[in-house]
Amino acid sequence: MASAELAERYLTADELERRMVDAALRCVERWGLAKTSMDDIAREARVSRATVYRVIPGGKDRLVETVLQHEVGRLFHEADSEARQATTLEDLVCVGVGIAMRVLTGHAALNYLVRHEPEAILPHFAFHRLAPLLAEIAELSRPHLSRFLPDEAVRPAGELLARVVLSYSFSPVPELDPEDPDSIRRFVRTYLLPALTTTEERT
């Protein structure tokens, strides 16, 4: 599913599907994925088990995929809204990196899985699955990055930024604090802008 479609799905999801997703996230945050059953999610959402399977057919695997799509769609939507206001490449990259890292590092259910059940979440970011995700992120970034970069540089730039965000979100370092705008800007200015632009473009 393309990134724009994910954002659109997040925005247009019906109330019942949102309840399923929110209930699943609360259950995973509380007990983890392995100990969360479809019955748990039904009780948390205050619906019948049959309703869960009707709204999200395919069991727990399909539910995990749906939750991931919703959360990625939410991230894309939030980043897109703020990115439109950026007036320089530096500002744009700061917005994108900052929002993405705050969402990922502050996501309680995701952090529980990374700490306690990495086998449940990390395969979705494994090498053989990463290329489509990177391509989607790069395509989402295209309308924004193309304002500041030549067309041939847009996709590599988008993929580079996605790799950086995923790497530092799953393995945080003190030098890059997603809650500190100055930290984000120092990192972007020191490491990312030189990788994205030529000397002439930065002056």
Image (tube, grey):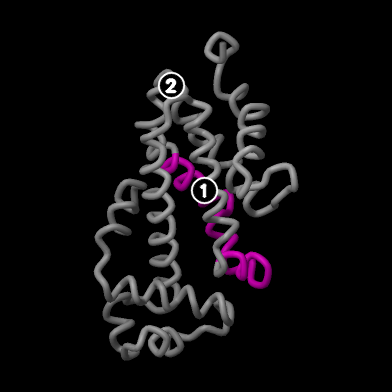
- Outermost residue to the top: 200
**Which residue in the protein does label 1 denote?**
100
Residue 186 x/y as whole percent: 66, 32
Q: Which residues are magenta?
A: 110-137
Kindly identify the residue that appears in the image at 54 percent across and 50 percent down.
128
Task: Using the image, determine if residue 99 lies above or below residue 114.
Answer: above
Q: Which residue is mark 2?
A: 148
Report x, y in % for residue 199: 60, 11
**Quarter of the image where the C terminus is located:** top right
The residue drawn where x is 57% and y is 68% is 108
The residue located at (27%, 64%) in the rendering is: 13
For the residue pair 155 and 198, the one nearer the viewer reads as 198
Q: CA distance from mark 2 to mark 1?
A: 20 Å
Q: Residue at x 43, y 60 (%)?
A: 71
Tell me the element at label 2: loop
Task: Give the crowd class for mark 1: few <14, some 14-19, many >=20 residues within 10 Å.
Answer: many
Q: Is residue 130 magenta?
A: yes
Q: Earlier in the sequence, mark 2 or mark 1?
A: 1
Amino acid carrying label 1: it is Ala
Residue 129 drawn in magenta: yes
Vertically, is 65 above or below 98? below
Task: Give the residue at the far right of this rendering.
Answer: 174
